[in-house]
Amino acid sequence: MCTLVILRRPGADWPLLLAANRDEMNDRPWQPPGRHWPDRPEVTAGRDLLSGGSWMGVNRDGLVAAVLNRHGSLGPAPGKRSRGELVLEALDHAEAAEAARALAEIEPRAYRSFNLVVADSREAFWLRHLGEDAEQVVAMPLPPGLSMLTAHDRNDLRGSPRQRLNLPRFREAAPPDPAAGDWSAWESLLGSREELPGEGPASAMTVALPNGFGTVSSSLLALPADPGRSPRWRFAAGPPGQAAFEEVAL
């Protein structure tokens, strides 16, 4: 189960702020964000070495894309394409609306279930694929304000213990200030291992399970309103709170 938090603030200098923890098996190899694809020199993204795709990236036009597995669909499956391809396909587009329209037309039976977010400084979309019996991928605009996605639906306080515990905390926290380099409140929340009573690690933001599954990296990203400015991406190559966040070259 991964987690993505997105704060949309139309009219602000930094209208989109994003935080994400990637949860995966610790032995699945990957590379930190970089320009790993010679045929996509405009894309900076983390690279999954097992499938060749990505879990999150940004392109030169200021479009960000991130994918999360839905509940019960961890890992690859025979006859299914990698969901990491979807991030790269989204980043072939210049605008979020264009990317959402294109990816809503994919063949859903080719993929296991997923939540996919595509966003730029003006618009943001959540694409939901519910799995084997789904007839289509549904694209929905993300409204202004705070949204959280895990392996469940957006802001699903009933279905997701992690959202039930942590969405109110993100709502109450001071938003990051990318211009000042202050991400402290969100950094602290991303590294939290506190659990809801009776819910176990599924409710914590950062997890480490005995079977080797856990939080393997973390990201903080901001998109500027000014097209002359570059996005800011800070990446921790390990569990937040243990691994330091460092700037990604964009």
Image (cartoon, grey):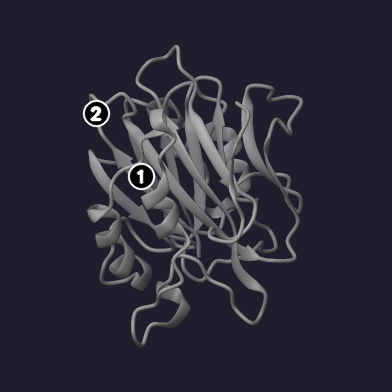
Q: Examine the rendering and report whether any part of residue 73 can be seen.
A: yes
Query: What residue did someone put label 2 on?
Result: 10
In the displayed structure image, the side of residue 178 where residue 250 appears, left or right: right
Query: Which residue ends up furthest to the bottom in the rendered image?
Result: 198
Q: Residue at x 51, y 56 (%)?
A: 21
x then y, percent, for residue 103? 48, 37
x then y, percent, for residue 71? 46, 68
Q: Residue at x 40, y 73 (%)?
A: 203
Residue type beneath disc 1: Ile
Which of the pair 161/196 is nearer the observer?
196
User: Which of the 4 image quarters holds residue 50?
Assistant: bottom right
Q: Residue at x 46, y 71 (%)?
A: 193
In the displayed structure image, the side of residue 159 where residue 136 appears, left or right: right
Find out whether the residues at labels 1 and 2 contact each other: C-beta distance under 8 Å: no
Residue type beneath disc 2: Pro
x then y, percent, for residue 55? 58, 47
Crowding at dot 2, Cα within 10 Å, few <14 / some 14-19 / many 20+, comes out as some
Query: What residue did someone put label 1 on?
Result: 6
Rendered view: 116 above or below 60:
below
Q: Residue at x 48, y 24 (%)?
A: 62
Crowding at dot 1, Cα within 10 Å, few <14 / some 14-19 / many 20+, comes out as many
Q: In the rendered picture of this protein, how many numbered marks are placed on residues?
A: 2
